Image: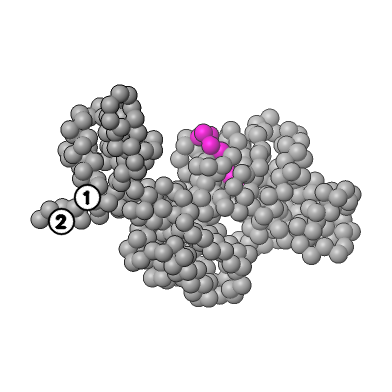
Amino acid sequence: MREWNQRLVLDLLRSTGPATRPRIARDTGLSKPTVGQALLGLEEAGLVRTVGRRAEGPGRAAVLYEANPAAGHVLAVDIGRERLRVAVADLAGDVVSRVDERNRCRSASALVRMVRELAERAVAVAGLGAGQVVATVVGSPGVADRRNRAVQLAPNLPGWGRKGLLDELAAVLGPGLVVENDANLAAVGERERGAARGVDDFAYLAVGTGLGLGLVLGGELFRGAHGAAGEVGYLPFPDVASGQGASAPGERGQMEDAVAARSVLVLAERHGLTGVRSPRDVFALARQGDDRAGRVVREEAERLASVVASVVAVVDPELVVLGGGIGANADLLVEPMTESLRRMTPLAPRVVPGELAEDAVLVGAVATGLAAARDVVFERGLRTARTRLT
């Protein structure tokens, strides 16, 4: 019962912010002496700290308590084909250090080493010691294969599907590692702090080097029977005449070939647009009014609309959030996507730009790690307090 009361008080402080003992008693329904005992135990465990006083009526100002955000930390890692991003956050979800680097790795071994180096650097910059990071969440393209301890369906990361890769990551990042699909984490991030706040049924469409979809249904992340829900890159796209849609099963998906970053350059060449080296160049020209670049953008938008139309016919989301390197050009894509959707289906949802941009995966990774980290810290803090008493 004592631990239950402590958990109740701690959860309240985490959800509502700093509060006095009388306020905690009112909000929890516990007696003031019970709240006092719970706060004493939480202080001894390092889970709660005082942050001044607050007047709540006549008489002496009451002591103000808050959940101690420094009681533990979460390590979040975003592994992309182009960039690696690593962040350390405290238990309030605030990022205390961050490291970003270009991904120049050409093998899985090199990528694991680089992840370890960036993680160690981020932890050092945060000024943390051993044991202060209590949860680690990695976002990666593809699907974690628990049986073979690998990450499947990630063709843009060479060697990522080899057996035992998850164990290699755990060896350099520590126990309790969670590896989640990056689009799934981005969806969690946009629901936590972005464009999907308060929305229980939505899809996050990530369009960049690859193509992925994160689904939140009924307020919960939906992964499917094998964790592959949202692998929309494998939808068919039978545009054989263009040379696209010819990938063999198990390789890069047909739809990913048709709409991801590489396809924008293929479309640019088809429309006679020369001198462009990246999709960014194409979108920049479209913003300047170049007709050929505009046609490329419209065709890209139509293809993305076909992806969304396939998804909405099955899961009927209220909202589709557009993200990723290509999706970041929502100012050019949303309007033609919406027009195409209205022609394709009577089920067209709202399509909106993501609000978190390149931070979506990290925000989702932190949010995912916080629940586990808070449980670990609570149990560890109470064990430490009990040891002191004995």
Identify the residue shown where x is 17% and y is 33%.
33
> Which of 160/62 is in front?
62
Under tag 1, what secondary structure?
Answer: helix
* 199 falls in the magenta region: yes
Rendering coords of residue 290 (x, y %) = 88, 51
* Residue density around tag 1, few if under 14, some if 14–19, many if 20 or more, within 10 Å: some
Give the label on residue 320, or none: none
Main SS of residues in magenta: loop
Under tag 2, what secondary structure?
Answer: helix
* 1 falls in the magenta region: no
Would you say 347 lies left or right of 98 here? right
Amino acid type at mark 1: Glu
Amino acid type at mark 2: Arg
The image quarter in which residue 131 lies = bottom left
* Residue density around tag 2, few if under 14, some if 14–19, many if 20 or more, within 10 Å: few
Instruction: Note whether 69 is above or below 159 in the view shown.
Output: above
Q: Give the residues drawn in magenta, as a range.
A: 196-205
> Mark 2 highlights which residue?
388
Give the label on residue 44, or none: 1
> Which of 303/95 is in front?
95
Rendering coords of residue 320 (x, y %) = 62, 39
Rendering coords of residue 46 (x, y %) = 27, 51
Marks 1/2: CA–CA distance = 9 Å
